[in-house]
Image (cartoon, helix red, strand yellow):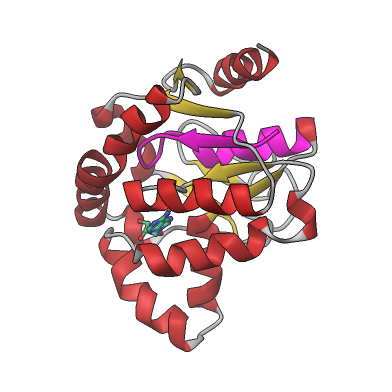
Amino acid sequence: MNLILLGPPGAGKGTQAKRLEQAHGLVQLATGDMLRAETASGSGLGRRIKAVMDSGALVSDEIVIEVIETRIAGSDAKNGVILDGFPRTIPQAEALDAMLARHELKLDRVILMEVDEAALIDRLAGRFSCRSCGASYHERYNRPKQGGRCDVCGAFEFVYRPDDKPEAVARRFAVYREQTAPILPYYEAKGILSRIDGMAEIDEVTRQIEAVIAR
Ligand code: AMP
């Protein structure tokens, strides 16, 4: 099973993708995480894309498509993937179709997490993640259960993203409306787009996603 989780920044795609990974043995392919790993590596490419990412703009289609294709071609993707944060533009959606065809894979569902923009800004403002395993948390809505210790791996260090600053958040929403939202009709026309309520409680959102997958 191959899925896309779509939705604006802060919709909870990463949180739900991690749950789907565990429940179904799928692999989460999050382009944001891959690009952040590239910037952390200090490579030439990493240095070039860091400023773009920190500002909230999109990295070029060419770079992102190359990054994702390497992973889709990898053996761990054979049991199915959850694409999180990709595609984000029409050219990326078209490139995805072509690469899936090349690897004889099929896209089963595109799940749109519908959310309220004002509430999302509030969500983004407080979020952080485990430095070692990437599990995501929120200062008000989803704190680690045991004080400052990651629920998943037990590590004690957490990180905040530079692009969760208010100016970058505003830019990311504008980019979503202008460049990413236009891909919705693309998937609607293929009859594989399902909408769920991304504002519900985390467990309820998972339940809705599971209901879509079971159909
Ligand atoms: P995310 O973690 O998905 O919110 O992505 C963080 C940032 O990485 C975005 O604001 C973009 O700068 C970059 N990025 C992630 N995925 C893509 C993509 N599919 N296309 C272009 N840029 C991306």
> In this view of the protein, which residue sits in the foreground, 90 or 171?
90
Residue 145 vertical position relative to residue 158 in the rendered view, above or below: above
Residue at 63 percent across and 54 percent down: it is 102
Q: Quadrant of the N terminus?
A: top right
Is 94 left or right of 104, judged from the image as shown? Answer: left
> In this view of the protein, which residue sits in the foreground, 203 or 140?
203
Percent across and percent down for residue 72 are 65, 56
Asked whether residue 138 is in view, the answer is yes
Percent across and percent down for residue 3 are 60, 35
> In this view of the protein, which residue sits in the foreground, 163 or 154?
163
Asked whether residue 29 is in view, the answer is no
Percent across and percent down for residue 211 are 63, 12
Percent across and percent down for residue 158 are 57, 58
Residue 9 magenta-highlighted = yes
> In this view of the protein, which residue sits in the foreground, 27 or 206?
27
Q: How many marks?
A: 0
Residue 215 magenta-highlighted = no
Is 159 left or right of 1, judged from the image as shown? Answer: left
Residue 165, quarter of picture:
bottom left
Q: Quadrant of the C terminus?
A: top right
Residue at 35 percent across and 38 percent down: it is 8
Where are the magenta residues, as a range?
1-23
Residue at 51 percent across and 35 percent down: it is 5
Residue at 41 percent across and 20 percent down: it is 199
Ligand 1 shown in quarter: bottom left
Residue 42 vertical position relative to residue 164 in the rendered view, above or below: below
Is 82 left or right of 153, judged from the image as shown? Answer: left
Residue 75, quarter of picture:
bottom right
